[in-house]
Structure formats: C-alpha cells, structure tokens
Image: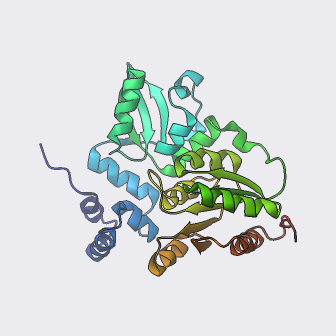
Amino acid sequence: MAKRKKFGEVLFEEGVIDEQTLRLALEKQAGSGKRLGQILEEQNVISERDIVLVLARQFGLKTVKNIAAHNFPTQLLDLIDSEKALQKLIFPLRIEEKTLCLAMVNPLDMETIDTLSFATGLRIVPYLTTPREVHAAINRHYLKTMNEPIQGGWWKILVIDNQEPVLTTTAAALKKVGFDVITCNNCVEALPIAVNKRPHLIITEIVMPRMGGVDLYNSLSKNPQTENIPFIASSSRSTAKEEAELLDMGFVDFIAKPINCIRLVARSKRVLRLIYDGLQTPPNQ
C-alpha cells in the first residue's frame, strides 16, 4: 500500500504554495499545536476550499458544497444533535444502504466517525467540506431561530472562564452597569450558546481544557451568523508575544489576569462603541 503523502507535499505538488512558503509555515507550526492548514490559512496563503481539495486528494475522499441549499428529512437530522454537529463540524447528508454519508471538516476525526457509527448502526462515509459550509447548513436546518430577529435590546455579553471566582466576579461587574450577561465555564458548551444567543461581545479565557478560547474564536469566525462578533481574550499565562499574536489573529482586545473590574467594564464599553457605533447606546452612558 502506497504511503499517504503529507498535506504540505500535496500543496506543493499542486502548485498551491512554493517551497519557501511551505518551509516557513512548517517552522511556524513546530510547537504551536496547530494544523499546517490552519497556519497557512491564518497567513492568507490558502483558502478553506484549497484545504478541502488537498485533503480530498490526500485521503481519496469526495467533497461536497452548497449543503444549506438542500432539504433534509427530520429523521436524518435527528441522527446528530445540533450541539454535536457544531462541536465536531459534521452534518448528515443522506443514508444509502446502511451507509451514512457525512459532511465533515476533519477526515482524521476517527473518534467521531466510530462513535456515530456505533450509535446509529450505520457505516460512515465522510465527504469533505469547509467549516463555513457546515455552519451554514446547521444554521438553516438545525437552528431555525437563527433567522428570527433578536428580541430584547441591551448589550448581550457572553463570558467564558473555567475559574468560578473569576466568572462570578466578571459577570457581577458587567451586570452592575446594565449589561445582559451570559456565563459559561467551558468553550465546548459556549459554542452552541454563542450561535443561538448571538451575543454582542464575547470575553473568554484562552487556556482551557478540551477547547480553548482560540479554538472557539476560529470556529465562530467561520460561521456567517457569528463571524462579526468581537472577542476580548483574557489569561494569566500569555506572554507579550502571545498577546500580540491574539490581536493579529483578530481579537479586539486582551485583558491580563487578575482582571481589574473597572478596566474590564471600560474596555467592554469601548469595544461596543467601536463595533456598533450608531446602533445603540451602551448602558450608563
């Protein structure tokens, strides 16, 4: 059996990137814990679709697009709950002779494939697609309330931190000046909350188990319904270099821990003014 070519090798062979770009990306990837495709995408060297096409060739899989434009029976959608679909970026396409055709972003996620196969009794055949495609399909077919107007009116802020004292103190400071605050102690649960509630601002700890603040940011930034939500990062572990990388990535601000509540409120108001200028007036202004 022929050895599967590495992702970078396929990109180079297809002429998507040159040798120097590949070498520099591999150097940046070392020790980062990120996939090579994520590094190249952050550098605007390749697109989501480029990644899908290269992975499809690398693993010998088919691709799928325009998922949201199609209709799917309820019994098919019921095979996967919306939270799992959002977390794993998967979407059921159809069932053919005891085989479930599954749109997914990561062809190496064998744990999800095996778990779903065991739960449904079906053989799983992956079809590769982009995160944006999966989000659009989930928004339309699972989260139908996403198309309804947001009710209420005051600023809605989602705060995520796995340290309960920090979470409680932060929420209390924001509520005191009139913000509508939603709290969550992990990013896995925060993901569907953010998609359903569509907060005006997300304040998240960066370093957390299972799913960190950067992973949450990357996931929501690929969802058409949540891509414009501003993020403020917080952490007690980040260096000046890591803080700069977060801001370059797209986070609008960074607040080091221990969090000063006066600074937190001031910076939250500042972000809301900058992003939503002319739409509403922040509380207590």
Give me the residue at 61% from left, 58% from top: 165
Q: Nearer the viewer, residue 25 or 93?
A: 25
Residue 219: percent from left, percent from top: 52, 54
Residue closest to the far front:
165
Q: Nearer the viewer, residue 45 or 88?
A: 88
Q: Give left or right: position of 52 versus 277.
A: left
Residue 74: percent from left, percent from top: 59, 24
Q: How many marks?
A: 0
Residue 132: percent from left, percent from top: 53, 51
User: Is residue 65 visible in the rendered structure shown here?
Assistant: no
Q: Does residue 254 sit above or below 80 in this rendering?
A: below
Give me the residue at 59% from left, 54% from top: 164
User: Is residue 2 visible in the rendered structure shown here?
Assistant: yes
Q: Quadrant of the N terminus?
A: top left
Q: Give left or right: position of 33 versus 223.
A: left
Residue closest to the far left:
1
Give me the residue at 43% from left, 65% from top: 41
Q: Quadrant of residue 260?
A: bottom right
Residue 180: percent from left, percent from top: 78, 55
Q: Quadrant of the C terminus?
A: bottom right
Residue closest to the far bottom:
240
Q: Give left or right: position of 44 versus 32.
A: right
